[in-house]
Image: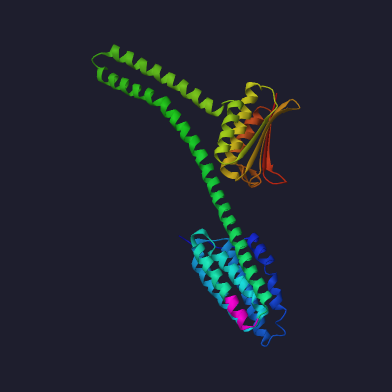
Amino acid sequence: MPVQRWRPSAGGLLWVGVWTFPLLDPASTVTATPGGIVAGAGLGLFTVAYALLSVLGFDHREDLDRVATAGFGVVAALGVALAAAYGERWLVVLLFVGTCGTAVYGGRERLTVAVTVLAAVLVLEVLLGLLHHADAARLISVMIATVLASGLVGAVRQMGRLIRELQRTREALATAAVAEERLRFSRDLHDLLGHTLSVIVVKAEVVRRIAERDPSTAAAQAGDIEDIGRRALVEIREAVTGYREAGLTAELTRAKGMLSSAGITASVQRTADPLPDGADRLLAWALREATTNVVRHSGARRCDIEIATVDGAAALSVVDDGAATAAGAAGAGFGNGLRGLTERLGAAGGTLRAGARDEGGFALVARVPL
């Protein structure tokens, strides 16, 4: 499997950037430290390596485990070397070694490694503090900060993991909802046609066997086949019409169930009076197209559906808080579903407006004159 190109997330960079301010303390001593150029270069390299590796830990990718492990080795070696070489004010560097270890190894499957790294960092802080005759209060504050910062990083990392799992679950639910609808249609169609086609096949075999020796009976059987075929066509038309033009009330029920199955909270508000059949069918079609697009493409958490009568027209509004380009829009234009819906509404004198909202999400408004 090809390795995907990794790009650090803006959130991870912001998090790491905010929490690098304690490094200002050792940085302020660089000019007064013997070999200050080496100390400054080492601190700069440590900061860059720590930031990139911590962000990589937040955006955990299994295909980059080896890179993360090697990078942590570099960060740990630099941090211990700097803390050992330049005095007690540099002990704070070990705090970042601990948080970096938690970011890299803080996943549920490697929690033991993260705890071991944190314990080793605390031991090193004590040993190097004794080596530098560090003030006890400073040493204790660094150790407490290491534990608290590592715990916070671990909590944020776990939160990110849970969010990713929820997103994958929502996508799976949306796919399952669409698949369930298709399965229901295929099952109903099978139940409708299975028996009828079996009867037609049996009668056709009878006709074939007796056509030469008993033409009148064969003609009667052929007439039965014709009648059965006509009834089957009527039933199929009724079934398809029921799916395509089930009526707005039935479509609302189906839409709420479909959205709920996909993990999307649905809010429905209907103030319009019972509508004429034509308007009712058109808005039902628009609702089906809109909710299908929300489930399939938007990644929304909430969808608001409103049906009202405005200025002599029946209006359907479907608004979600998901991706603005998701609900059937193709760039600045419409996808096939919305183009077909626009044509249907236009033939009845209606209109369709669909597009991204300034406050985020996508909105579809269909209007049909009464």
Membership of 130 in magenta stretch: yes
Image coordinates for residue 234, horizontal then vertical, percent: 47, 20
The boundaries of the magenta stretch are 124-133
Residue 365 belongs to magenta span? no
Name the residue furthest front.
Answer: 136
Which quadrant of the rendered structure holds the C terminus? Answer: top right
**Where is 148 relative to 227, above or below?**
below
Residue 202 in percent (x, y) is at 31, 22
Please identify the quarter of the rendering in which residue 191 is found.
top left
**For residue 272, above or below residue 26:** above
Q: Residue lying farthest left? A: 213
Taking the spot 57% from the left edge, 37% from the top edge, the residue there is 260
Q: Residue at x 52, y 38 (%)?
A: 177
Instruction: Please name whichever residue, 133 or 99, is drawn nearer the observer in this view of the structure.
Output: 133
132 or 325: nearer the eye? 132
Q: Position of residue 232 (x, y in %)?
A: 43, 21
Dominant SS in magenta: helix
Residue at image coords 40%, 20%: 229
Q: 177 or 356: which is nearer to us?
A: 177
Where residue 85 sits, quadrant-wise, is: bottom right
Q: How was this image coloured? A: rainbow
- Relative to 339, say whether 103 is above or below: below
Is residue 82 visible from the viewing direction of this image?
no
Q: Is residue 216 visible?
A: yes
Q: Residue at x 47, y 31 (%)?
A: 185
Image spot of residue 189 (x, y percent)? 44, 28
Q: Residue furthest bottom?
A: 34
